[in-house]
Image (cartoon, helix red, strand yellow):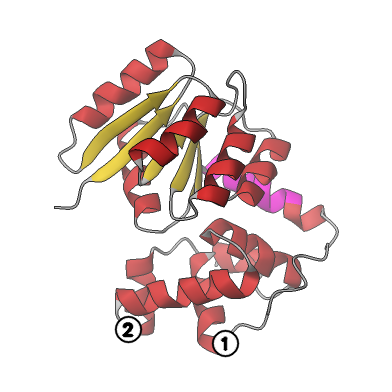
Amino acid sequence: METIKILLAEDHVVVREGIRELIQGEEDMEIVGEAGDGEEAVALVSQVEPDVVLMDIAMPKMNGIEATQQIKQSRPSVSVLILTAYDSEEFILALVEAGASGYLLKNVQGREVLNSIRAVFDGESVLHPAIADKLFNRLQYEEEKPVRPEKNEVLSQRELEVLKLSIEGLSNKEIAKELSVGIRTIQTHWRNIFNKLGVSSRTEAIIFGLKKGWIMLEQSKE
């Protein structure tokens, strides 16, 4: 069984202790470091080499948004999962643009946190339902902006199918079953999509597709 190495970035010691206790009971997870502020989190990433960073937003010295951006710039393979009490649209968009793979509110159940850690480790994106609603509603009224025009934005038909299925909430395994291919093929499609669009997460790719009109919000409601 592959062990997921996790770095906790949370300034409240009591909260951090609770998360640590939750994770320590899982055989496939290991806490390799803990940070009490954003600067410490960025520094620890290069030292302990985690697979997933569980990150709060409001922290001293450096907030979670800037820390996420720096971590993704230096270590693109590290998945950042936000666990916070803040559901501001500005925070959500900033963190998605910074490369966060998931965004959870602190009112979620412990089991959902664990499942989300496994999901982002597997290369998937996780959004709390309330966060997804805010994000998609914001996009409906946001004017289209030029996004990384230097990138090759042309996706293949199969890559578009993967993107369209992802907005319905399907996991990589479910998308593979729907398209009758192996999960490694889907992972390859995602790598190609990320490279072509210049993004680093499924959520960023979905937002890009929505802004370009390649996929529609209605698809997720069918």
Q: Residue furthest bottom?
A: 157
Q: How far across and down, in percent of the image, does residue 104 sit?
A: 49, 37
Per the model, the C-alpha gap separating discs 2 and 1 is 16 Å
Query: Tag 1 or tag 2, which sits nearer the N-term?
Result: 1
Give the main secondary structure, helix, strand or loop, of the magenta stretch: helix
How far from the left and from the top, in percent, is residue 74?
A: 53, 49
Q: Is residue 14 visible?
A: yes
List the residue tagged with mark 2. 181
Residue 182 is tagged as: none
Residue pictured at 70% horizontal, 74% vertical: 151
Q: Which residues are magenta?
A: 129-138
Query: Which SS class for mark 1?
Result: loop
The answer to whether 59 appears left or right of 47 in the picture is right
Determine whether, in the image, residue 58 is placed left or right of residue 82. right
Q: Is residue 112 left or right of residue 94?
A: left
**Placement of 38 over or under 178, stated as above or below:** above
Residue 105 seen anywhere in this rendered image of the structure: no
Q: Nearer the viewer, mark 2 or mark 1?
A: 1
> Farthest front residue?
47
Q: What's the residue at 42%, 40% (across, down)?
A: 46
Callout 2 crowding tier (Cα within 10 Å): few <14, some 14–19, many ≥20: few
Is 220 magenta? The answer is no
- The image position of residue 193, as x and y in percent, is 55, 74
Amino acid at pointer 2: Val
Vertical arrangement, residue 217 with respect to residue 184, above or below: above
Eyeballing the image, is 105 above or below 98? above
Residue density around tag 1, few if under 14, some if 14–19, many if 20 or more, within 10 Å: few
Residue located beneath label 1 in the image: 156
Q: Nearer the viewer, residue 72 or 218?
A: 72
Towards the viewer: 141 or 116? 116
- Measured along the vertical axis of the image, is residue 149 above or below residue 132? below
